[in-house]
Image: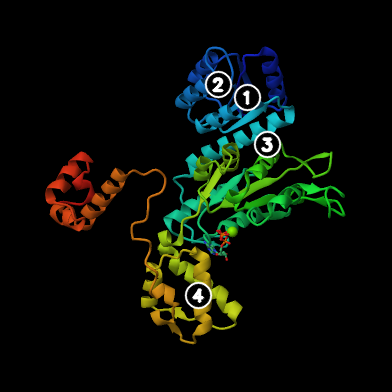
Amino acid sequence: MSARILVTEDDQVQRDVICDILLQEGYEVIPSESGAVSLSVLESDSCHLLLTDMRMPEMDGLELLRQAKRLRPETEVVVMTAHATVNTAVTAMKEGAIDYLGKPFDKEELLVVVRKALDQSALREENKQLRELVVRDSSLGNIIGESRAMQGVFDVVRRAVPLITTVLIRGESGTGKELVARHIHFEGPRKRSPFIVVNCAAIPDNLIESELFGHEKGAFTGADSAHPGKFEAADGGTLFLDEIGDMRLDSQAKLLRVLQDGAVERVGGTKTRTVDVRFVSATNRDLSERVTEGAFREDLYYRLDVLNVLLPPLRERVDDLPLLVQHFREKLAEKLGKATPEIGADAFEVMRRYRWPGNVRELEHTLEQTFILTDASTILPEHLPEKLRNPEPETGDYVLPAGGVILEEVEQDFMRQALERTGGRIKEAAELLGMSYKTFQYRLKKHQIDRESTSEHD
Ligand SMILES: Nc1ncnc2c1ncn2[C@@H]1O[C@H](COP(=O)(O)OP(=O)(O)OP(=O)(O)O)[C@@H](O)[C@H]1O
Ligand SMILES: [Mg+2]
């Protein structure tokens, strides 16, 4: 079945050009001159992709996007807009558009964006069908984990592997971001092509451009010979942009251009080369927060964040500890050339309670250190490093909630937890929080907390 594309463009000449290109590619195309016409099409027929102009008389592209999404949430939307209005494009992506095309665009640009959007649409469809068929695996290649959180990660990663879609990997330090990036590349169709790593935080500002784009001989003092950049090196393969959250704004602008049209120009050069690169990026920062702070370009964020992998911190998946420990015991036995000891139950408990700020990497190093320093056949708590047994007190057990949570929500959350812990007994729950019985009851009503749902009964 060929994909069905609804093209909404009020300018007839442009509409015809676009429709012709898509028809030649074998797509099924429905031309439409206005938002109203498109909506009536969507009412009776489902489409894979809606391609819409932004500025149109009467209903504009944004309004069409909103209504189309309400009518047919499964339809992907790509908006076409003049370069000057990138902000509108970003708004459109917030409203659910999957991509945008800056006008004017050529045939190749149009087809690249359309193909990517349709890839996504197929992916979502497949997602829906496969969601029921969850298989529990204890690992995906070298990535270990059977916790629910990791099953979710495996799910996205599995889907990302056969595609060339851009992937953004988030997670604290040591949670396995690079491991996932490598898996995506080396299990995928590009495994025989290069996997190039760029650490965006480590390259000095003045070198980043020549590092990424390359330079021609004599481009600057010291440029004794021509040098291809990382983009060219990754042509046909994958470019892993590590620590992308630390990239400077001016470099971000340049990167955005490559993502948009795949064109790179060496520093000091005049020739534009087109590269075919799959982008995988990683960060331990909260990119949307960086956007709010003005430190990260919003349009770039939306370009990078197509498929999203969020790696949970180790402390939130302690159920995976036995598997991980087993994995590292085997790995370390080989590395250290000796049988590695068992972890006793008490030592295990210590490990479960520790917060692991350095996550899996810290676990691996902790085990290695412990195995080197002892010949015991079973690890006891005293064999473990001091920091695990007597962890530094956290800055309060009260971790500040992230992302605009208001105090009332925190209060509700605490009240729920107190009820849960006391089996729903109000008096005890109130005592636990140092509230009077009356205040607690009053706030229960106010927050409409359902006591029954947190426990059986008194
Ligand atoms: N789920 C996992 N299963 C097995 N090994 C893991 C897992 N997660 C991480 N590791 C191991 O932990 C170490 C750190 O992983 P990695 O370098 O991928 O982390 P990262 O998220 O990129 O960290 P950073 O933010 O510090 O760069 C590696 O040796 C990796 O093999
Ligand atoms: Mg890393």
* Residue 25 visible here: yes
Tag 4–tag 2 contact (CB < 8 Å): no
Tag 3–tag 2 contact (CB < 8 Å): no
Single out the mark in the foreground, 1 or 4: 1
Q: Is residue 55 left or right of residue 288?
A: right
Q: Residue at x 49, y 69 (%)?
A: 363
Residue 25 x, y percent position in the rendering? 71, 28
Q: Is residue 419 left or right of residue 74?
A: left
Which residue is under mark 4?
Answer: 367
Residue type at mark 4: give it: Leu
> Alpha carbon of mark 3 to alpha carbon of mark 1: how far?
14 Å
Tag 1–tag 2 contact (CB < 8 Å): yes
* Residue 348 visible here: no
Q: Secondary structure at mark 2?
A: helix
Residue 389 x, y percent position in the rendering? 39, 75
Mark toward the start of the polypeptide (4 vs 2) = 2
396 or 115, nearer to the observer = 396
Residue type at mark 1: give it: Thr
Give the crowd class for mark 2: few <14, some 14-19, many >=20 residues within 10 Å: many
Which residue is under mark 1?
Answer: 81
Residue 252's place in the image compared with 455, above or below, is above
Give the number of marks: 4
Mark toward the start of the polypeptide (3 vs 1) = 1
Mark toward the start of the polypeptide (4 vs 3) = 3
| Extreme-bottom residue of the structure | 375
105 or 145, nearer to the observer = 105
Residue type at mark 2: give it: Gly
Residue 371 x, y percent position in the rendering? 51, 80
Residue type at mark 3: give it: Gln
| Tag of residue 61 | 2
Q: Is residue 450 left or right of residue 185?
A: left
